Amino acid sequence: MSDDSTITSILGVAWGGCVLLCLWFAVEILRSRRQEQAVTAWLLLFILSPPVGVVAYLALGARKLRRRAARKAQPAERSAGAQADCVAVNGLDRLVQSHGLPAATAGNAVALRTTPATAYAAVLDLIDRAEETLWVTTYILGTDRVAQEILRRLAARAAAGVQVRLLIDDVGSKDLRDAALAPLVAAGGRVERFMPASLIPWPRHYANLRNHRKIIIADRRRAWSGGMNLAEEYLGTKPVANRFRDLSFVIEGPAAAVYAEVFAADWLDAAGEDLRAARPWEALPAREAGSGVVQVVPSGPEFDGDPLHDLLLDMAHRAQRRLWIVTPYFVPDAAMLKALTVAARHGVEVTVVTNRSSDAGFVDFASIPYLRAVVGAGGKVLRLRNGLMHAKAVIVDDALALAGTANLDQRSLFLNFEVMALFHGPAETRAVADWAEVLFADCDGELPPLTPVRHVAEGLVRLFAPVL
């Protein structure tokens, strides 16, 4: 047999193997609960190029972690005084709880931190004041002076006897070397990398499932969260180029214990340490009668369903006067886009605020047809003229706001580990809306002209949006 024949035979066997794998993956996809657009995109990719489809599915196809869903931690016990009646939004509360998530809690003090300096001060204050436990999770922990200062202060608290646990995403924090973490470990803290990336999926190693949560919890009583990573591009007192405009907040009260539950479940999965078993988790008292009502809403592969997606759909359907969405990346699924366009046609003031040019150019291009659809239905699109925006927020009418880590794209809605705070009340909603209106002033509604070539290109990109 000639060398050419041998090579041809090997290629034929490899191609046949890829076809068989694609058939196997196709059956798995058809049996799974995925968006129809995502199913179509995957099947089309398998047909057009089986080898590419195999590699892409191995790297990007995982969506749910059945093992973790079966054993996820139960919500923390709460005092009766921490439970919210939430009469005005009782349906939303029930919806969230139907996914096995905690009810809203009353008695929370909520303070927005909307600038790099105030957010950085809040982070350092939370760290410095921790007395018993200090738990931190972030997608990106930088290598710059801001990250170094945060690590230094974490090490100081660990040396003082505080239980310090740091969880960083393996992909988001890929530039951070173990040497930078060594002082914290030497001081008594523990550090874990969440789900080390691997092309071949195996337990705790999925390239496609990333922990996008950003949470700091001190003593289970105070929590900081939002869109900001722990790096100089997001936090700090000194001006830096290309710093993101972002949103974060501090919560003091029973909702902080729910954030602690979210962290504890992630830590158990990554490190095998049960933080609940090590210390008693007594119920936390409400901070003040009648203060902020907050519902912590985690979402991700550890849940059988998609609680955040369901929540956003319900919020869109409930909107009567306004529905404002702030997101750096706008790539909704068909159901979410339909909810927004129907709301706009119903007369609701639907406004989507996003970037003109973000740090993900291909996603920017993919967002344009969805933005056109919103405008075509009577909604408004605002894009930041200069700079980069990384905030995530939704405002509905005058008494409902959502803020946290999730973008309004299909990666955040269906793949990433995310966590949002749902504020059931006029004071917090007004604060988020006031912040958004400042952002509006730096935006305009211009979209690229729709040429014939661009029209076709946008259609193709939209087809494959679920697998971006």
Image (cartoon, rainbow, N blue to C red):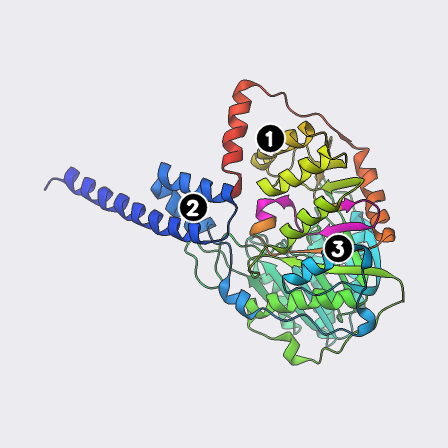
Q: Nearer the viewer, mark 3 or mark 2?
A: 3
| Residue type, numbered disc 2 | Ala
Residue 35 versus residue 162: which sits nearer the camera? 35
Residue contact at pointers 3 and 1, CB within 8 angstroms: no
Residue 19 versus residue 116: which sits nearer the camera? 19
Q: Earlier in the sequence, mark 3 or mark 1?
A: 1
Q: Residue at x 81, y 66 (%)?
A: 253
Q: Earlier in the sequence, mark 3 or mark 2?
A: 2
Q: CA distance from mark 3 to mark 2?
A: 35 Å
Q: Is residue 129 left or right of residue 57?
A: right
Residue 329 seen in this snapshot = no
Residue 5: image x %, image y %?
A: 15, 39
| Residue type, numbered disc 1 | Pro
Q: Residue furthest left?
A: 1
Q: Which numbered circle lies on residue 394?
A: none
| Residue type, numbered disc 3 | Leu
Where residue 442 sits, quadrant-wise, is top right
Which residue matches tag 2? 56
Region rendered in magenta: 395-412
Q: Nearer the viewer, mark 2 or mark 1?
A: 1
Tell me the element at label 2: helix
Q: Is residue 182 left or right of residue 280?
A: left
Residue 114: image x %, image y %?
A: 80, 48
Tell me the element at label 1: helix
Question: For residue 439: magenta?
Answer: no
Residue 349 seen in this snapshot = yes
Which residue matches tag 3? 422
Q: Earlier in the sequence, mark 2 or mark 1?
A: 2
Q: Is residue 370 left or right of residue 399?
A: left
Q: Residue at x 44, y 43 (%)?
A: 42
